[in-house]
Image: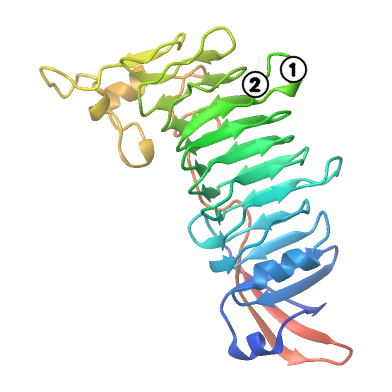
Amino acid sequence: MKRIIITFIAAIAFAAGAMAEQDNRVVTCQHGSTIRAYYGADAFKSAVADAANGDIITLTAGTFNGCNVNKAVTIRGEGIDKSIISWIDYFNIPQGDEHVLYLESLTVKGSTTQFVGINGSEKVFISKCKFWRESDIYFKKCNATIMQSIVRGLHTLQAGEYSTVTCLNSQLLENLSTYYNASYTPEQNGHWYISNCAIWGNVDGLRCSTIKNSTFRVACSLEEGTNTSSHCLVREGSSGFFNSYYVKPEADPWDENDLAWNNIFGEWWEITNDNAKATYLGTDGTQVGVYGGTYPWNTTPDLPTVKWLDVTESYKNGKLNVQINVE
């Protein structure tokens, strides 16, 4: 990958103690043409406090102390398992803001006592991220798109009221549900639109949703009438899936060409059996699951990431000469 060295004069906000220790954890916040840098465990919290809607916050590798976010900002990390933000309970974005809440190439960990929620933003885009949580994760009053990501809650992943959640080529590691009220209009209830995902939980609480080209780890029942499904790979014992593949858990007698469930998948739920790849095809003719479709599973960051940042010389008027290595 091409390496870029950028040298510029910028206003820098930092704690003198952290700067002296040269903590390798760095967060930058870009507002227009101004870039501020923050160092250490609390760097992310400081960047969020100073940020405005539309700003870009970039993290190097490392674990950062988190905080609740109430601004529509872009937050980018160095990789899905490299840049980690601990203890974010919610992203609460004011309704009507024109900016997008954009999260890319990082891990967000919630606390053990609260939900993780994304609330209020009309535009949410999550790419190549991991949401790791020991409670529920919900989306409320927002339109969210999740791509090539891992979303894990302890109990339920919920598309709440007034929410539409679109998941593409992602791993959803819990039960899925939607907020549903019979007296609501269709737009007021929650909706999932899921394509080429690996789902590890059941969908008993799902309504008003569409699932296609996806694989299910456990046998489950999809409620008919309110949901739409097509070309999913499910275990025998499941029900409610139309135009889908029902696969027996084990082959008896076992044969390497027999398409038993336990003889299909490899790491990250990739279909490794050649017969299965040719047999279990989605609506677009590619294999079902996270390695098929338009955006096959890939967690490599799409944009350059900050590898290190160094202040090489001091200037008057509070300005510094800053060198950033971007790769």
In the image, 118 versus 18, the foreground residue is: 118
Find out whether the residues at labels 1 and 2 contact each other: C-beta distance under 8 Å.
yes
Q: Secondary structure at mark 2?
A: loop
User: For this view, does 250 lie left or right of residue 303?
Assistant: left
What residue is drawn where x is 73% and y is 28%? 162
Q: Which residue is mark 1?
A: 184
* Residue 1 visible, this angle: no
Residue 18 position by quadrant:
bottom right
User: For this view, does 72 lie left or right of residue 301?
Assistant: right
Q: Residue furthest front?
A: 113
Q: Amino acid at mark 1?
A: Tyr
In the image, 204 versus 230, the foreground residue is: 204
Q: Secondary structure at mark 1?
A: loop
Point out the image quarter for the N terminus. Answer: bottom right
The picture places residue 73, in percent across and down from the top left corner, at 75, 54
Q: Which residue is mark 2?
A: 180
